[in-house]
Every structure is written in C-alpha cells, then in structure tokens.
Image (tube, rainbow, N blue to C red):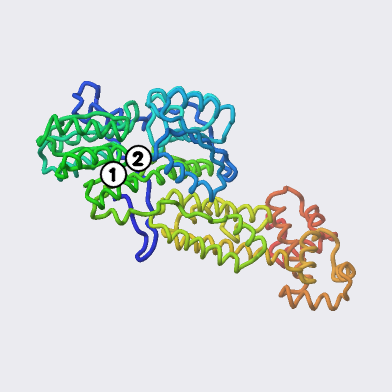
C-alpha cells in the first residue's frame, strides 16, 4: 500500500508518488507471443532510459504567476481532473487555461498551435493518441515550451520531447486487479473485457496488463471476448447483451476499463438478464464506481482519483518551477478498493484550499505575531481536514512558503547565518521534518525569528549603539572620546561612562582591539610594511603601533608575520 500515516489520530495521510522498479529489457520483446508479458515490455516500461532532446531548463524562481496551458480530452474524468488541477494551482498563484478537444486528434493538434502562439510558461498535455502525440510534443519542444504529459502516456518517440510524465500506473494497477479478479473467480471460468479507447496508453495497459497477468496467475481462466465500446454507455450495454446471449452461463466475469459510464452500461445489461452472479471489476475510482462497490454492483476497482491525477501534474510543475529535479515518470498510487475499504476513500480529494501565503507575508512584514500564529493554526487545520495529502503537494507548498520568507530575509538584509545557517542548508532543514505538524512548527519558528530581527532592525538605536557603528566604520580616522563627544553632542566624561557600561570595556580598549584585529588581517594578506599598516588602521605613530600590537598579541608585527 502506497499510503502511510505519520502519526495517530485524526491526522492526514501523506501519499508518496511511486517509483517503479524496472526489470531488464528482454531481447526482441516482439518475438514473444501476445499473451506473454515480455511481448509488451516497451509499452509497460516506456521511456525510462530515453535520451531527452533539448528540454528547457527550469527558471528556478517559483510557481507564482506562471501561466500553464492544459490540453485535455473530453470525459467526466477530465472535468474532475481539471478540478484537482485548479485546487492545487490556486494556493501557488498559477494561472491555468484549459482547452478540450473532445477526443478529436486533429482538434488537439490545432490547440497545440494555438498554445505555441500564446507562449505559456508550461504545457500539461493529456495525449489522446499515443502515436499522434509525437508531433505535438516535438512542436512544443521546438518552440522551447516545457511539456508535462499526463494521464495517458505518449508514444516512446514523444517522450524525448517532454520534461516528465505523471499519471496512473495502468499496467501495475491492472496486474493487481487481475490477481484479485482471479481470486474472486477462484481461478476458473470465462471472462470478457471492455477496453479503453484504442490508440491510448490506457487501452494497452488495461487490456494486456490484465490478460498477460491472468495467463500467468490463473491459466485455468478463459478469455471469451475483448472489445472497446469507446467508453459509451449504450454501446457497452448492447455489447454485454450480445455476450450474454452468445456465451450464457460460461460468462462468469467482466472487467471494465471504466467504473463510471461504461460500467453503467454493463450493470444495466446484467440487471435486465438477472445475472447478478457475474463478477465485475473495473478501473476507478469515480464516486459512481465507489457507490457501486457499496451497493455490490462492483466487486473491486482500482484506486485512481481523477482529482489526484490532475493535482499530480500540477505538483510536478511546481517542483520544476522551483528548480527541483523531477523524475521522468511520477505515478499515482496502486491500490484496490473493495466494499471492505471503500468508506476510507469515499472522500473529498481536493487539496487544501484558501491558504493565503500573501497573508503570512504581510503579517511577517508587519511584525504581527498574532497574525502569524493564526496563519499556521489555520493552515494546520486545513491539512488535517483532508484525509489524503500528497507528499508532492505538501512539499511544493512548504517550498513556496519558505521562498516567501527568504525573500523577506534578502530584501531586508537580515543576517542569514544567524537566522537559518545560510541559504545552502535551509531546504535541507525543511526536509528533515517528517510530519506536517513538525514541518509547520519549524516554518513558524523561522517566521517568528524574522519578526524578531525586523523588530530589532526597526528599533531606535541607543547612543552607544550609534557610537559603535560610527567607530566600526571610521576606525582608521583620528578618534578619541573628545572627537566622539563633539560628534554626538555629549560630554566626554559622560560618553566614556556610558560606553563602558553598555559595551563592557572602555573606549580606548575597544578602539585598539578593533584596529589591531584589522592590522593582523593586513599583515597576513596585504604584503604592506608594518609602518604602512599602522597608517591604514589609524595609528599615526609607528612606534606606538608596534608597542600596542605587542600588548594585544604578545608579539611585534614582524614576529606575527
């Protein structure tokens, strides 16, 4: 199971996108029969070693204000997919535009040309046809527009032109579904398959992933029919009616590539025929499919939330805009839903909304501690209200938040090393924390520390702080308590007492320490003679410099060098 809970109780589950294990490629995969998994190696494991072609480099300046064009087919799945994209993009200030092609390959090609003219910062493409996607990806790459392909896998050749791919592991899902289906069928009996739309990667994975796995896992099962109905309800209904008449009691199970529209057609035909005995499994996981599980009109579906699918593409885009290295393929989790666990997943899969990072930015600049506390309390509450949070989303969110804080540090010239130990280590620290709660607590501590430094910086300086700043900048000039007293309009005696009380040493010792420290640096690095260094650091009498140097260091300048 690709979910894990970082803590007990009512805490969100963080989901991690899978990294697939890639077996060695067999020689001449096409030489194996179609019902042998080795035949389909290049379809199941496409592009993991492909050499990329002039992929645009990340701007490394964050996701805020970036324009992302999304090219999608037309299906209820992709409307929910769009909702997942919007919910994930909104907190990061990404501007999304959508173009739907209605499963028209020529229309999608025209939309690619429109996008090229519009010049977005990135394109997310759901390729309708694996083969036809090659030219679309090549054209976008030619115009130096980064592309994330998503949901459906493009042709191997197209993978050379894209930054990365995100989406469901159809092959992995249907291999898992096949084994569960075989167990429900007790390893025997005839079955039929309703496939996805031909030409798409989902067609290949959901057909041959299933068939080849059943050939290995349950050789006693018999494939009776395999057809595509274009995911159309009525065509599916008619097809299943025909199968029932043709095969009768030999048909024991049906596998569908869709748990929504196509599955409704399957169920209608079975209900009319009084065949509630037929085992039904499908690709999922729409709320329609989940409801069917609860009503025993489906026995299992794969876990494939369209909202998380859309969110995953945006998450990878956020990582890329932030300059993080992205893997060539980022998968949704592989998981089966049944009547026994569907209630855990029958949920709202939106990422947290209405987290206003600009509000935190304002509260820090205004040094408003109450506002900062309120922001982090509300943010934690927003996350805990969601059952499933993707690790990529949370990572992207925290990077964006930390980038805002770093911007305050830079623009106000705050002491970076005192605050965070330097820019190089700051993101390493961020990823050291393994729970949402601890990560947000650490980010809050950074925000509070910035407020403290801003307050110190804005606080009026005392007389002695002003004097010390003046001396530090003018130590090479003739300085004395009389000179400084005149400069700051106080008496020398009063200034001398204040200086010792606040600085912890008398003025003469402070000035000599400062000058000798600078002299040591010059002796080590400048090549100047000792009498020249004396003048540079503010001593007009070389002998006085030699004696003072020995007093503070224990050696003369010539011995020190």
Marks 2, 1: nearer the viewer: 1
To which quarter of the image does residue 13 belong? bottom left
- Mark 1 = which residue? 302
Q: Is residue 297 visible?
A: yes
Residue contact between numbered discs 2 and 1, judged by CB atoms under 8 Å: yes
- Mark 2 = which residue? 168
Query: In this rendering, is residue 366 above or below 32?
Result: below
Quick one: 473 or 249, which is closer to the camera? 249
Quick one: 389 or 345, which is closer to the camera? 345
**Which is more N-terminal, label 1 or label 2?**
2
* Residue 424 position in % (x across, y down): 54, 50
How crowded pointer 2 is (Cα within 10 Å; few <14, some 14-19, many 20+) is rated as: many
Query: In this rendering, is residue 526 above or below 196?
Result: below
Q: Is residue 497 left or right of residue 117?
A: right
Numbered disc 2: secondary structure: loop
* Residue 538 position in % (x across, y down): 82, 59
Quick one: 206 or 330, which is closer to the camera? 206
- The structure residue drawn at horizontal position 78% and vertical position 59%, both measured from the top left corner, is 473
* Residue 46 position in % (x across, y down): 34, 30
Q: Is residue 303 left or right of residue 427?
A: left
């Amino acid at each position: 199971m690709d979910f894990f809970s970082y803590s007990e109780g009512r805490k969100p589950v963080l989901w991690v996108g899978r990294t697939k294990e890639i077996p060695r490629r067999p020689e001449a995969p096409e030489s194996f029969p179609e019902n042998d998994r080795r035949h389909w190696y290049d379809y199941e494991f496409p592009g993991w070693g492909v050499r990329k072609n002039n992929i645009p480099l990340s701007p490394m300046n964050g996701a805020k204000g970036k324009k992302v064009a999304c090219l999608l087919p037309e299906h209820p799945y992709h409307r929910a997919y769009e909702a997942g994209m919007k919910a994930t993009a909104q907190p990061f200030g990404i501007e999304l535009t959508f173009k739907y092609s209605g499963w028209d390959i020529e229309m999608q090609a025209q939309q690619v040309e429109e996008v090229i003219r519009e010049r977005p910062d990135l394109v997310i493409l759901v390729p309708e046809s694996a083969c036809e996607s090659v030219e679309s990806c090549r054209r976008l790459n030619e115009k130096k527009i980064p592309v994330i392909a998503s949901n459906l896998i493009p042709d191997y050749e197209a993978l050379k032109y894209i930054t990365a791919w995100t989406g469901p592991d159809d092959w992995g899902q249907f291999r898992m579904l096949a084994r569960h289906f075989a167990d429900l069928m007790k390893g025997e009996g005839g079955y039929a398959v309703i496939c996805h739309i031909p030409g798409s990667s989902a067609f290949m994975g959901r057909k041959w992933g299933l068939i080849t796995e059943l050939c290995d896992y349950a050789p006693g099962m018999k494939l009776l029919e395999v057809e595509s109905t274009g995911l159309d309800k009525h065509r599916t209904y008619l097809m299943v009616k025909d199968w029932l008449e043709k095969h009768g009691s030999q048909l024991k199970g049906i596998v569908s590539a869709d748990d929504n529209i196509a599955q409704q057609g399957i169920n209608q035909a079975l209900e009319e025929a009084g065949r509630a005995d037929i085992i039904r499994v499908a690709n999922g996981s729409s709320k329609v499919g989940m409801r069917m599980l609860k009503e025993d009109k489906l026995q299992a579906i794969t876990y494939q939330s369209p909202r998380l699918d859309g969110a995953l593409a945006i998450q990878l885009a956020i990582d890329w805009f932030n300059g993080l290295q992205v893997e060539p393929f980022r998968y949704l989790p592989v998981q089966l839903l049944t009547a026994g666990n569907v209630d855990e997943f029958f949920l709202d899969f939106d990422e947290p909304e209405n987290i206003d990072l600009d509000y935190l930015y304002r509260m820090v600049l205004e040094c408003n501690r109450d506002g900062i506390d309120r922001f982090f309390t509300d943010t934690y509450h927003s996350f805990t209200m969601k059952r499933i949070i993707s690790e990529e989303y949370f990572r992207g969110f925290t990077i964006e938040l930390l980038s805002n804080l770093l911007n305050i540090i830079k623009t106000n010239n705050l002491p970076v090393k005192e605050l965070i130990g330097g820019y190089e280590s700051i993101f390493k620290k961020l990823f050291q924390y393994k729970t949402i709660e601890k990560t947000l607590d650490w980010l809050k501590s950074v925000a509070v520390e910035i407020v403290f430094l801003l307050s110190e910086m804005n606080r009026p300086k005392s007389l002695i702080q002003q004097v010390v700043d003046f001396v530090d900048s003018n130590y090479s000039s003739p300085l004395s308590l009389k000179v400084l007293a005149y400069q700051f309009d106080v008496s020398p005696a009063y200034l001398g007492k204040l200086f010792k009380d606040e600085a912890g040493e008398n003025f003469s010792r402070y000035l000599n320490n400062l000058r000798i420290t600078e002299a040591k640096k010059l002796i080590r690095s400048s090549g100047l003679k000792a009498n020249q260094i004396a003048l540079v650091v503010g001593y007009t009498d070389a002998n006085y410099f030699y004696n003072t140097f020995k007093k503070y260091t224990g050696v003369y300048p010539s011995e020190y060098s």
